[in-house]
Amino acid sequence: MEDFNEEKFNGDWGERLNNQNKDFEEKYTKLYDELYKRFEIEFGNLQSLDSKCDFLQELMDKITEANNDMNNNYDINELAEESESKLKGLRSFFEVEMQKLFHKTEKNEKSDEDMLWFKVGLCFAQGIMEKYKSNGVMNSNWTAPKIAKDLNLPKCEKYFLGTLNNYDSSSPNASKNIFNNLAKIEKIIKHCDDNKISISPSFMVRYNEMKQKSIYNKK
């Protein structure tokens, strides 16, 4: 029976670990490259927030699986800290991208309410503009600049002017008339509904007219 050779045993064991480590490095370097490449190619083509979040979550789940595999291979894990670090770094990158999506969505949700057209539209929707009328007609003494100043909305003057003068949709300044944009009016209505704000009947009349016109134009 051959005597135990500790030096040879340690050498053989070390070689096996080195071979395992090499396979380990190749496997997870390939995974790193694959996930990052998928992100570069596919992420930008996704349209909705949900699809982007699901995609990032899928990539992060694959990294979690890889980390679990590392933890179940103690000896390999000890010799492959670089691979583990790279994958953790990639996961952190995906997490940051996910946070950007949520931040962007929150910002977009708030931005409508901060827009000048929204503030003016809300004045019409809430019936605030009625106080500037006489017998249902705008009082000539109340000009757009005066109304904007009275409501403490000086930057909204052009939107008051365009809406009060009912700029035609073919006008160069058509965007200053809030009633030229059905989508914006619907956002204002949704905001009122969500916040239990009563909507002026005259505003709803204009809205329904816009809807009918939109349906007619699509025929």
Image: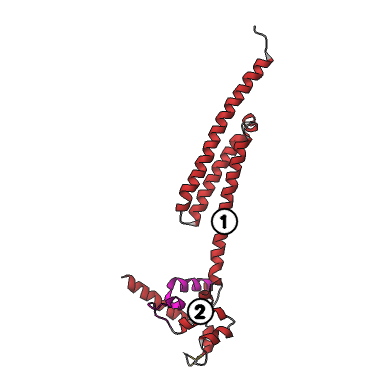
| Mark before the other along the chain sequence, 2 or 1 | 1
Q: Amino acid at mark 1?
A: Lys
Check disc 2 and report the residue beneath it. 125
Q: Is residue 187 magenta?
A: yes
Residues 151 and 1: in front is: 151
Residue 100, numbered label? 1
- The quadrant of the rendering that contains the C terminus is bottom left
Image location of residue 181, percent across then percent down:
43, 74
Residue 194 visible at all: no
Up/down of 173 relative to 67, above or below: below
- The quadrant of the rendering that contains the N terminus is top right
Q: Is residue 189 magenta?
A: yes
Q: Residue at x 50, y 80 (%)?
A: 158
Up/down of 215 relative to 40, above or below: below
Residue 218, quarter of the rendered image = bottom left
Kindly state the secondary structure of the residue where label 1 is placed. helix
Q: Residue at x 50, y 40 (%)?
A: 34
Up/down of 114 relative to 160, above or below: above
Image location of residue 119, percent across then percent down:
54, 76
Image location of residue 202, percent across then percent down:
46, 83
- Between the residue at mark 2 and the residue at mark 1, the CA separation in whole angstroms equals 33 Å
First to last magenta residue range: 166-191
Residue 152, numbered label? none
Q: Amino acid at mark 2?
A: Ala
Q: Residues within 10 Å of mark 2 (few under 14, many from 20)?
A: many
Q: Residues within 10 Å of mark 1 (few under 14, many from 20)?
A: few
Residues 120 and 174: in front is: 174
